Structure formats: structure tokens, C-alpha cells
Image: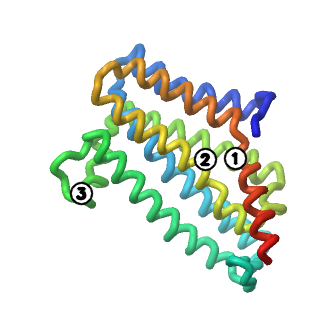
């Protein structure tokens, strides 16, 4: 269930997450803006996952077996991609609306008008931080997914569900953390949040849960 050794990507992960902590503590960054960037982390990971699924479909397997509660059917990779976009997109919508409501960033704004205000709320610091996260996850994808050859081995079904558990845990922490910001002590809460997030990323093996789910699903088939 838990990792013991730190790899170079994990060390880089720590450094990336220390940037917002430094910004809030020493550069007077708005902690709510930082939480907004962490909220948008879900979108970054989702977009990159779509690109990974497209690469597997184009380069490796145009079609794959779809096991839906024991019912098998051969489906195009584009089916998996469309399913992921719709399902994950709904997840992102619910998660962002929860964040906006809890954090109080978007009071008195229409349901979809909230998204139009995101660039203004990010400001220059938030856009820089968002760019750092995009760069980190892009490099992580290039090295851990493509250079390692994982794209040749991983199934589309596993790839489709891979982001969910990690993102679900992360975003629960984001939403709860943003709720506590209303009590003040921004620096303390951002410190606690970043430490918890790093510990989750480093020590929880989310892939182990996917292995268990795949075995259960295979048993149904």
C-alpha cells in the first residue's frame, strides 16, 4: 500500500508543490488563488489522459475488449476516449462547482459564468503556477508513459480509470482546505495542505487499487 523509495520524478513533485507554499509564505500570494490552481490540476490531468488514450489508440491498439460487468464487447479506442471525456468532464464540473461554493470565490455569479472569471482570479502568479503544473505533468507523461514504453502495455480501460482515485482524494483535500481558509491563518492551512498532498502522492499506491479492481472485474467475466 505504501512506497518506500523516492524517485527523481517524486523529488520533482515535491519541488513543484513547494513553489505555491513559498509563494504564500514569502511572496504574499493569495492562498485562495493557489487552491484554485490545485483545483484546475484536475483539468490538466484529464486533458493529458485524453492525449495518452489517443496515442494508445493510434499507435498501439485501435480496438480493445470492453468488460462491462461481465459483458464483453470489442470497442474502438475512440469509444473509450469519448466515454472518459463525458464521464470525467461531469466529475470536473461537479468538483469545480463544489470548490467555488465552498471557497466563496464566485459568490453571486451565474453557474457557467464562474468559469469565465477564472483567468482574472488566477492573476499573474496563478498563471505562472498553473504553467509550472502543466510543464511538470507534461514532462511526467513524456518520461513515465512514453519513454518507459508504458503506452505499449497499458490497457485503455485501465488508462481510462487511472486518474480517478488519485484526483478524487486530491480534490477532497483541496475542497476541505479551501473551506478552512475562511477561518483565516492562510499560511498555516496552505502548509498543512501541501504536506498532506505530498504525503498522499508519495506514499499511497493508487495503482494497487486499480489492480484489485481489475482482478474483480476479470472474475466477473
Dot 2 and dot 1 residues touching (CB under 8 Å): yes
Determine the residue positioned at 41% across, 33% down.
Answer: 177
Question: 152 or 66: which is nearer to us?
Answer: 66
- Of callouts 3 and 1, the N-terminal one: 3
Judged from the image, the secondary structure of the residue bearing numbered disc 1 is: helix
- Of callouts 2 and 1, the N-terminal one: 2
Determine the residue positioned at 60% across, 30% down.
Answer: 198
Q: Is residue 194 left or right of 180 when viewed as pictured?
A: right
| Residue occupying the far top of the picture | 26
Query: Which residue position is annotated with label 1?
Result: 206
Asked if residue 207 is positioned above or below residue 112 in the image, the reply reads above
Is residue 82 at all visible to an observer of this figure? yes
Determine the residue positioned at 49% across, 23% down.
Answer: 192
Residue 161 percent location from the top left of the image = 64, 61
Question: 213 or 90: which is nearer to us?
Answer: 213
Query: Which residue position is annotated with label 3?
Result: 113
Amino acid at each position: 500500500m505504501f512506497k518506500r523509495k523516492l524517485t527523481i520524478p517524486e523529488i520533482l513533485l515535491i519541488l513543484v508543490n513547494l513553489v505555491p507554499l513559498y509563494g504564500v509564505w514569502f511572496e504574499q500570494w493569495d492562498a485562495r488563488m493557489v487552491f484554485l490552481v490545485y483545483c484546475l490540476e484536475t483539468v490538466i490531468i484529464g486533458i493529458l489522459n485524453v492525449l495518452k488514450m489517443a496515442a494508445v489508440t493510434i499507435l498501439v491498439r485501435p480496438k480493445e475488449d470492453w468488460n462491462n460487468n461481465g459483458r464483453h464487447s470489442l470497442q474502438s479506442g475512440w469509444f473509450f476516449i469519448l466515454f472518459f471525456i463525458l464521464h470525467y468532464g461531469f466529475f470536473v464540473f461537479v468538483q469545480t462547482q463544489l470548490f467555488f461554493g465552498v471557497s466563496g470565490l464566485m459568490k453571486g455569479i451565474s453557474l457557467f459564468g464562474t468559469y469565465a472569471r477564472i483567468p482574472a482570479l488566477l492573476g499573474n502568479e496563478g498563471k505562472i503556477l498553473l504553467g509550472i503544473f502543466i510543464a511538470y505533468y507534461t514532462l511526467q507523461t513524456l518520461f513515465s508513459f512514453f519513454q518507459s514504453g508504458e503506452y505499449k502495455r497499458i490497457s485503455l480501460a485501465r488508462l481510462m480509470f487511472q486518474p480517478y482515485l488519485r484526483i478524487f482524494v486530491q480534490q477532497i483535500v483541496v475542497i476541505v482546505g479551501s473551506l478552512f481558509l475562511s477561518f483565516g491563518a492562510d499560511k498555516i492551512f496552505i502548509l498543512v495542505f501541501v504536506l498532506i498532498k505530498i504525503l498522499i502522492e508519495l506514499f499511497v499506491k493508487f495503482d494497487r487499487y486499480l489492480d484489485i479492481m481489475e482482478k474483480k472485474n476479470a472474475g466477473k467475466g
